[in-house]
């Protein structure tokens, strides 16, 4: 398998500080694959996805613990998750989706200090021997192409 887009992640310098706080501060939405900025949360594509269209809904504030999430942020996080599901179903037409939050490093959180919710589109056959035995994932559509398909609906589609 050849996956050159992962080279930067594997061999590149490791980011100091919080990835999500940096993305929130920067005004480089296209480069960072930010699809939407709300009052309390933003929606961003996972740069190293499990499958095409893997999104994350992230609080604007650096909060690690779900029980410390302010109610208004919690409500917007769920609303934007629902909206993202609607948009993914409409645009990418997955067969199903996984939605989840990993709380803490041991649960699999890649950025354990900043809570974020994953939305992972799933298609029949995308979990096969490569991902299960070989710990390898095949991402069939480039991040840039998926971004182009999703960014406009995130500005237009409401629930």
Image (tube, helix red, strand yellow):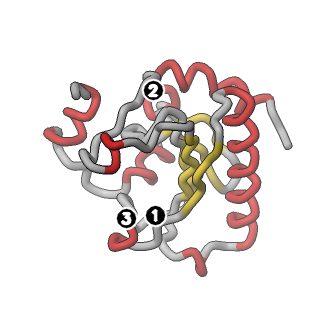
Residue 29 x, y percent position in the rendering: 52, 32
Quickly name the residue at label 1: 114
Residue at coordinates 34% horizontally, 38% vertically from top-left? 137
User: Of marks 2 and 3, which one's residue comes earlier in the chain?
Assistant: 3
Residue at coordinates 27% horizontally, 49% vertically from top-left? 133
Query: Looking at the image, which is closer to me, 108 or 63?
Result: 108
Residue 45 x, y percent position in the rendering: 51, 38
Residue furthest to the left: 11
Q: CA distance from mark 2 to mark 3?
A: 22 Å
Label 1: state its secondary structure.
Answer: loop
Quickly name the residue at label 2: 143
Residue at coordinates 65% horizontally, 38% vertically from top-left? 95
Residue neighbourhood size for the residue with mark 1, other residues' Cα within 10 Å, grouped as few (<14), some (14–19), many (≥20): many
Label 2: state its secondary structure.
Answer: helix
Query: Looking at the image, which is closer to me, 157 or 29?
Result: 157
- Identify the image quadrant of residue 50: top left
Residue neighbourhood size for the residue with mark 3, other residues' Cα within 10 Å, grouped as few (<14), some (14–19), many (≥20): few
Instruction: Name the front one of labels 1 and 2.
Output: 2
Query: Looking at the image, which is closer to me, 8 or 101?
Result: 101
- Identify the image quadrant of residue 113: bottom left
Residue furthest to the right: 159
Quickly name the residue at label 3: 108
**Residue 22 shows which numbered tag?**
none
Q: Please state, as top left, top right, bottom left or bottom right, where the C terminus lies in the image.
A: top right
Residue 33 x, y percent position in the rendering: 49, 33
Above or below, 39 against 147 in this view is below
């Amino acid at each position: 398998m050849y996956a050159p887009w992962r080279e930067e992640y594997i061999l590149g310098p490791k980011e100091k500080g919080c990835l999500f706080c940096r993305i929130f501060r920067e005004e480089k939405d296209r480069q960072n694959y930010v699809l939407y900025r709300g009052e309390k949360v933003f929606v961003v594509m996972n740069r190293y996805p499990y499958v095409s269209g893997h999104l994350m809904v992230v609080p604007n504030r650096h909060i690690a613990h779900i029980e410390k999430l302010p109610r208004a942020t919690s409500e917007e996080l769920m609303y934007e998750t629902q909206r993202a599901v609607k948009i993914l179903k409409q645009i990418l037409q997955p067969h199903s989706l996984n939605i989840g939050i990993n709380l803490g490093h041991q649960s699999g959180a890649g950025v354990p200090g900043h809570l974020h919710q994953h939305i992972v589109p799933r298609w029949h056959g995308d979990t096969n021997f490569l991902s299960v035995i070989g710990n390898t994932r095949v991402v069939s559509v480039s991040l840039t192409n998926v971004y182009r398909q999703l960014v406009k609906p995130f500005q237009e589609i409401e629930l």
